[in-house]
Amino acid sequence: MSDEDMSHLREIERCVLWIASWTIHNANHLRVTGDNEVKVGGHQASSASMATIMTALYCQALRPEDRVAVKPHASPIFHALQYLAGHQTLEKLENFRGFGGAQSYPSRTKDNDDVDFSTGSVGLGVAQTLFSSLVQDYVIHHGAMDAEKAGRMVALIGDAEMDEGNIYEALFEGWKHDLRNCWWIVDYNRQSLDAVVHEGLFQKFEDMFRSFGWDVVVLRHGRLQEAIFAKPGGDVLRKWIEQCPNQLYSALTFKGAQSWRERIGQDIKDHAQTLSLIEALSDAELEEVMGNLGGHDLPSLTEAFAQARAHDRPTLFICYTIKGHELPLAGHKDNHAGLMTPTQIDIFRKRVGVREGHEWDKWEASSLKASELQDVIDKAPFFTKGKRAFTAPKIAIPETLPLSQTRGKPTSTQAGFGQILNNLGKADSELARHIVTTAPDVTVSTNLGGWVNHRGLFARKSKKDTFRDHKIPSTFNWASSPSGQHIELGIAESNLFILLSALGLSHAINGARYLPIGTVYDPFIYRAADQMNYACYQDARFMLVATPSGVTLAPEGGAHQSIGTPLIGMAQDRMAYFEPAYVDELAVIMRFGLEFMQRDAKAGNVSENGLDDDSGGSVYLRLSTRPLEQIKRDMTPELEENIINGGYWLRKPGPNARAVIAYTGAVAPEAIEAVGLMGEDVRDIGLLAITSADRLASGWSGAQKLRQERDVSACAHVEKLISCVPKDAAIITVCDAYPTTLSWLGSVKGHKTRALGVERFGQTGSIAELYNYYGLNAEGIARATEEIAPGHPIRLARRT
Ligand SMILES: Cc1ncc(C[n+]2csc(CCOP(=O)(O)OP(=O)(O)O)c2C)c(N)n1
Ligand SMILES: [Mg+2]
C-alpha cells in the first residue's frame, strides 16, 4: 500500500470513529430528552476498540463475496462505515437504537445496510461464520457455486465473547469437516463487560487454535512501537509492555502520559538508554506510542489480512487493542456501557476538527477533500458491488410426498418421517437434490438412516465405509463424499442449530437455495434454544424434526421427556410448530412446510384467517415414537387445508353436546377411546384433532387484531372450528406436554375448560402406566370431563 493510500485509510478511520461516537451520543443526549428517560446505551468504548480493524477490513481487505458477523457492540462502527459508503441513511443513524432506526446490534432482517449475519447473543455469530464456510463448501461441491467465488466468512469477536462454550463446540466441528476460508478476528482489548480479562488468555487461544489446525496471527505491537523497539534500549521497553499486567496497562492508558512516565520510570530506572527514549517523546507522542497496539495500527492490519488472503486456511487474528481507544474513556475498567459526557464529546469534536452543526457531514473529521475520501471508500472492493444479498429461485415441491403403504400396521410419526425421506432419497427429483439433512449424532435414532443410505454423508474428501469394505453386515452406509447430502455432527445440539441457520440462509448468502432438515431429540431443544432463536431471528429457513418427545417415550425416563417444548414452539417467532398424530397428516404438513420455508419474509400480509402465511418461516415438527393405528381415509383438499391451518373435527359435536375433547399428537388413541367411553351417555360429544396449536393460536390472535383494525370479515380457523360447540359445553384438552399448550382454547368463545397434560418431571414406565399417572388415559380424560361438563354424572361404556 502506498503512503497516500495509508493516509486515506487513516482519515477514513477518524471519520468512522467520529460518526460512530456521535451516533451514540446523539441517541443518548440529544434524542433522549426529559429527566426520566433512561439512557439507551453506551458502548462508545467497545465500538472505538474496533474502529481501526473494521476500517482496514471494509475499506481494504474485504471482497464483496466475504461475509461478516460483527461484534454486537461494534454496531455503530458498522453503521458508520455503511453511512460513509452510502448504504445507510442519516435518518436511520439519527434514530440509532430508536423505533425503526439503525439497530443496536447488527440485524439482517431489521437493518437496511447490508448486514450479513445478525449478532447480539455473543458467541453465536462467531459459530455462524464457521458453519457458513462449511455450507459454502457444500454449495461448491454440489455445483451451485464456482470455487473461485468462495468468500471469507469473517467473525469480529470481543475477547470476553471467547468465553462462550458454543465457540469451542463449533471449533471441534470445523476441524472434523476440514474448515477453510474462515477468519476470526479477536478484539483483544483485555476488557469484558464487568472488568479486565485474565492474564495470558491470548496464549491459551493460540495453543488451542493451533492444535485445531488454524493459523494464528498475533498483532501485538503497531509500527510506532516497533520503531522504538528497534532503537538502542528499545528491547527493554518491549519487554516491559509485554509483561505489563492487563489491569495496569488499562489503568495507565486511562490516566495518560504522566502516569506512563512515572510507572515506566520506576520499573526500568536502571536502563538509561530506554529512559531517554521515553523522555524524548512529548506527552501526546508517548500516549500515541503506548496506544499503538497491533489492532490500532492500519499498516500491520492490512498486511496481516493481505497475507491471510493468499491461502484458505482458517485463521485466528488476535489483535491487541484498547477499549475506548482515542476517547477519554480509554482503558477504564468500567467503560463498557460508558458514555462521553457532553463536555467530553465537545472536546473530542474539537480534537477531530468537526465544526458545530456539521456533526453528520460525512468527511468533516478529515482535513482532506470530501470527494477524495468518498472516492476511496466507493472504490474499496467490498463496496463496489452495492448490496450483496442474493435471492434464489424456489424449489418445486410435488403435490404430495411419497408415503409408504403401511398395510394397516400401526405407525409412529417418527417412522412416517423416516419413510417419507427414505422414499424421497430413493428417487431423483429436484426436491430430493435440494434437501440437506443433519443431526447431532442422532441420525439413526431419529429415523434418518434410510435417507442417508441413499444420499450419503457429505465431506470435502471422500471416505469409505470400512464396515462395508470388509463386508460386515450393517444396516447403514456410512461413506462420505463431496456429493453426499447429510452433514453428520457430533452430539453438540448448539452446532445443529447454527448449521441449520447457515444452511437456511444459503439462498441469501450463496445464491443457492437448500431445504435443510435437522433432527434432534425434542428435550434437547432446551440445550440450544438460544441458537434456535438466533437462527429464526435472522430468518434462516429450516425444518426441525424433534423426536422422540414428551412422556410418550416412556421407558426412556424423565431425563429425556420433554414437557415445555410446545410452548417454545408456540412462542418462537418465524417458526410454525406442528404436532400431528397420524402419518397422513405428517405428509401434508411436511409438504406444506417445505414450501412454507421458501416464502419471502418481505411478502408479509396477514390474511383473513389471521395467519401471516405469505412471509413463511421455519417449521418445527414434534414427532413421536409411539406407533398408532392409522385412520383409513382419503386426503381431501378440505382436510388438507384444515391440517395445515391447525386442526379439524374428527367427530363434530352435535347441538346437544355437553363436552368436546381436543387433543394434539400421540395421545390421539386415548382421546378417541375417551369419546368412545362417554359417547353412549354424552351423545353429541365432539373430538377435535389439533395438528398445530401454534397456528391455531396465532391465527386467533391475528384475526382479533384485524377486527380491532375494523376488518370485520376476519375470522380465525379456530374460531370457525369452535363456533359449532354449544355455549354451555365444556372443552377438555389433552396433550403430552405442559397443559397451557391447549388450555387457551376455552377463551376463544368462552367455554369452560379443563386442560390435561404433564406438569411434573416424568418417570420411567410403560406408556399406559405414565398416561394413567398423569391422567392422560381414557379414564382420566373421562373423569376430567365429568368434573366440569354440565348435567348428570356420566356413565362410561364398558371397555371391550
Ligand atoms: C449470550 C450473551 N450474554 C451476555 C451478553 C451481555 N454482553 C454483551 S457484550 C459482553 C461482553 C463484552 O466484552 P467483550 O466481548 O470483550 O467485548 P468488548 O466490549 O470488550 O469489545 C456481555 C457480557 C450478551 N450480549 N450475550
Ligand atoms: Mg473485550
Image: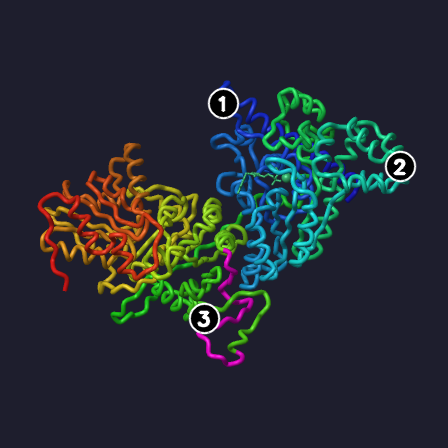
Residue 364 coordinates in the image, percent (x, y): 68, 27
For image coordinates 45% across by 62% down, the residue present is: 442
Determine contact: label 2, label 1, CB under 8 Å: no
Question: Horizontal placement of 1 versus 530: left or right?
Answer: right
Cα distance in 3D space between marks 2 and 1: 54 Å
Crowd around label 3: few <14 · some 14–19 · many ≥20 (10 Å): some
Q: What residue is disc 2 on?
A: 271
* Magenta stretch, residue numbers: 469-492
Cα distance in 3D space between marks 3 and 1: 61 Å
Residue 489 coordinates in the image, percent (x, y): 51, 60
Assess whether residue 483 is covered by the magenta stretch.
yes
For image coordinates 18% across by 43% down, the residue present is: 723
Crowd around label 2: few <14 · some 14–19 · many ≥20 (10 Å): few
Q: Establish whether ligand 1 lies closer than 8 Å to the Cβ of label 3.
A: no
Q: Quadrant of the N terminus?
A: top right
Crowd around label 1: few <14 · some 14–19 · many ≥20 (10 Å): few
Q: Establish whether ligand 2 lies closer than 8 Å to the Cβ of label 2.
A: no
Cα distance in 3D space between marks 2 and 3: 73 Å
